[in-house]
Image: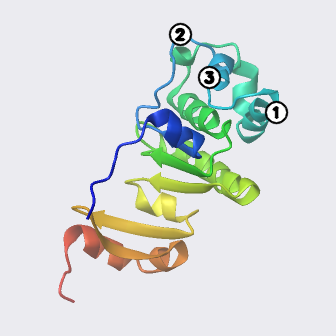
Amino acid sequence: GEPVQARPAHRVAREGLAHVLEDRSLFASMTVEENLLVGNGADAASIRRAFDYFPALEPIRSRRAGLLSGGEQQMLAIARAIVSSPRLLMIDEMSLGLAPIIVERLLPVIRRIVDETGTGVLLIEQHVHLALGIADRGYVLAHGTVTVSGTGAELRANRHRLRDSYLGSSGH
């Protein structure tokens, strides 16, 4: 096949892709609101929408991002991504460094964003069972190959398929 040509990040963003990196990539010395304002296409309406999805950020809108808790930083990173009204939102390791209870609170917000906006979400997550609680579909990759796939409900109901995909079949 023909080699894939790298495209500039600004062009990819204009085409509707927003990416939340595992390190969150916030501007630590800037406030919550300033971080939102640097989002692609940020305006008053999109920032209001971000605060609607993450109301805990509104009272701390003037706090520097570097002073936020891990959960607040993750909310801000996702909020900054959605101000651009992306067609596809990629979230890489949302749970990294967060307590499970925080992840359990964030996942329904991700589901709500999908349901209300039609934005597609690609959630790359090692905590599979938490992610499958909101997923329409799930895929397990091993060395770049899909080893297991199905609807979120199918995969939740067949946990042995997931276990076997990580540990190898037990032969039973």
The N terminus - image quarter: bottom left
Residue at point 48% right, 74% down? Answer: 156
- Counting residues from the start of the chain, the first of labels 3 and 1 encountered is 3
Q: Distance between the residues labelled 2 and 3?
A: 13 Å
- Counting residues from the start of the chain, the first of labels 2 and 3 encountered is 2
Look at the numbered disc 3 and give the secondary structure of its residue.
loop
The spot of residue 158 in percent (x, y) is: 42, 80
Question: Alpha-carbon neighbours of circle 3 within 10 Å: few (<14), some, or many (≥20)?
Answer: some
The spot of residue 128 in percent (x, y) is: 42, 61
The C terminus - image quarter: bottom left
The spot of residue 155 in percent (x, y) is: 45, 75
From the viewer's perspective, is residue 131 above or below residue 54?
below
Q: In this view, does 13 lie to the left or right of 167?
A: right
Question: Alpha-carbon neighbours of circle 1 within 10 Å: few (<14), some, or many (≥20)?
Answer: few
Asked whether 166 or 92 is in front, the reply is: 92
Give the colour scheme of this rendering: rainbow
**Circle number at residue 45:** 1
Residue tagged 3: 38
In terms of image quadrants, where is residue 48? top right
Dot 1 amino acid type? Ala
Residue tagged 2: 29
From the viewer's perspective, is residue 18 above or below residue 112?
above
Dot 2 amino acid type? Ser
From the viewer's perspective, is residue 148 above or below residue 23?
below
- Counting residues from the start of the chain, the first of labels 1 and 2 encountered is 2
Q: Distance between the residues labelled 3 and 1?
A: 14 Å
Question: Alpha-carbon neighbours of circle 2 within 10 Å: few (<14), some, or many (≥20)?
Answer: few
Residue at point 40% right, 68% down? Answer: 139
Residue at point 70% right, 29% down? Answer: 42
The spot of residue 56 in percent (x, y) is: 71, 31
Residue at point 49% right, 80% down? Answer: 154
